[in-house]
Image: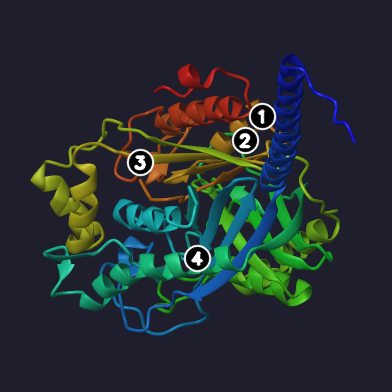
Amino acid sequence: MTRLAIPPHARCIKAFLLVLFAILLGGVRAGSDMAAEKDSADDAEAKFAVGVATRDVTPKEPVPMWGYGDRHAALSQGTLDPLYAKAIVIHAGKDKVAIVGTDIGRGPTQAMMEKIRAAAAKVGIDHVMISGSHSHHGPVTELLDREGFGKGTFDAAVAYAKQLPDTLIEAILEADRSAKPAKMGVGTKMINYNRNRHSKRNPKPTEPMLAVLRFDDEAGKPIAVLVNFAAHPTMIDSGVLKFSADYPGAMKKKVEDELSTHCVFMQGASGDMSANPPEGAGGHEKFGAALGDQVLEVAKGIKTAKPKNPGVKGKVDHFQFQSRVDFNNPLIMVAYGRAFFPELVRCFIEVAKQGIEPELNTVLLNGEIAMVGGSGEFFANHSNRLKERSYAPTTLFFGYCNGHDMYFPTIEAVSEGGYGADPPVSPAAIGSGEKMMNQALINIYTLMGKFPESKALAK
């Protein structure tokens, strides 16, 4: 058979077509790979999972108790009910947030938070909010391993404070490991379960909002319930030197028993809020159960769903406010030492003598839930006004969060005077709370994409 000769130019065209086909085929394959990578990225961004863990944080030895100055350095004498730390870790898109509620009087110290954040960051948790319930029947946590600051006098309390951040880290890491695909929903209800213990004017402001976040697994079984409410847990007499979670403990137990789940309590802006028990619900156990009934009503009415746009964004702000108290004056130290006890006061003044340096945390979850945490006892109208001004569908305020810098009264509350507003317990400059809430509002709108981030987040 005679073979046809292919002209040189035809062979060039054939070779070119083969190369072009290979390039096009490669492009198709590359496009498929890119599409697969995009689908994978979309899956990562759409991820929503929740885990929870609990740790007992009740001291095993007698230690000074936190909250009431007239106890001074009196040691604890046992336990009425255990103290817990309960952690929720949320995986939303590519980011994570840890929310921890403890049955302790305050949030962790700055040194504790540095250790906790470093450990959380190693597993991709870049946002951490830890609030104390503000129970006045918990342990002192500020004492240090230094002579004159706790060491040698209150060694059990020093050891407890050194161990506490490790225990909180354990809870966070376990919650992170246990995270499972989840759905969530939010519910709120206005209730009159708190009262203003400070103001002399009428009507007295209160913070009536009870907020509940419900997290379910894919089958609809509750993984955890987060409760946000504002009222001082001071329903047990100061003379009782036994550990107790006060009414939040009773509330959590009621919810957990009914729903077979974990309940996490995040205290609100309770600086001027006391509990206001309904008729027949006096005492911390009955009031906690009554509040639990309210929580259950809200929780059972929540319809959970997978968030449309899972994600976590956040910002941490540190402030420095001039103190209204001269902590460098030795007479001031003597006066505080008599009011509380010298070692505790030295630990506080060591931090405060250069000025009051509170921390503000702002977290936006799924583009819809704004969570603001302040390191102190904020008055109710700070929270009320923040929520009124925020256009986020849901805005929550957590007090005693990531620290404790004493009271932050409103400007008008300072004008009235009284405990919670006078300099000895609210040393930060007048208007400090308002400045922090303004920053929180700017943060919320910036995280929602309303403001240019580079300018709006600059202090």
Q: Do the residues labelled 2 and 4 touch (CB within 8 Å)?
A: no
Q: What element carries label 2?
A: helix
Q: Are marks 3 and 4 in contact (CB under 8 Å)?
A: no
Check residue 388 in the rendering and tell me which mark sits there, or answer none: 1
Residue type marked 2? Asn
Characterize the local packing of mark 1: few (<14), some (14-19) or many (20 or more) Cα atoms within 10 angstroms.
few
Of badges 3 and 2, the one in the foreground is 2
Check residue 111 in the rendering and tell me which mark sits there, or answer none: none
Residue type marked 1? Glu
Characterize the local packing of mark 3: few (<14), some (14-19) or many (20 or more) Cα atoms within 10 angstroms.
many
Residue 153 placement, left or right of 385: left
Of badges 2 and 4, the one in the foreground is 4
In space, the residues marked 2 and 4 are separated at their CA atoms by: 33 Å
Disc 3: which residue: 426
Q: Do the residues labelled 1 and 2 touch (CB within 8 Å)?
A: yes
Q: Which residue is drawn at 26% across and 74% down?
A: 159
Disc 4: which residue: 173
Residue 389 in the image: above or below residue 197:
above
Which circle's residue, 1 or 3, is located before the other in the chain? 1
In space, the residues marked 3 and 2 are separated at their CA atoms by: 20 Å
Residue 358, image x and y in percent?
36, 40
Q: What element carries label 1?
A: helix
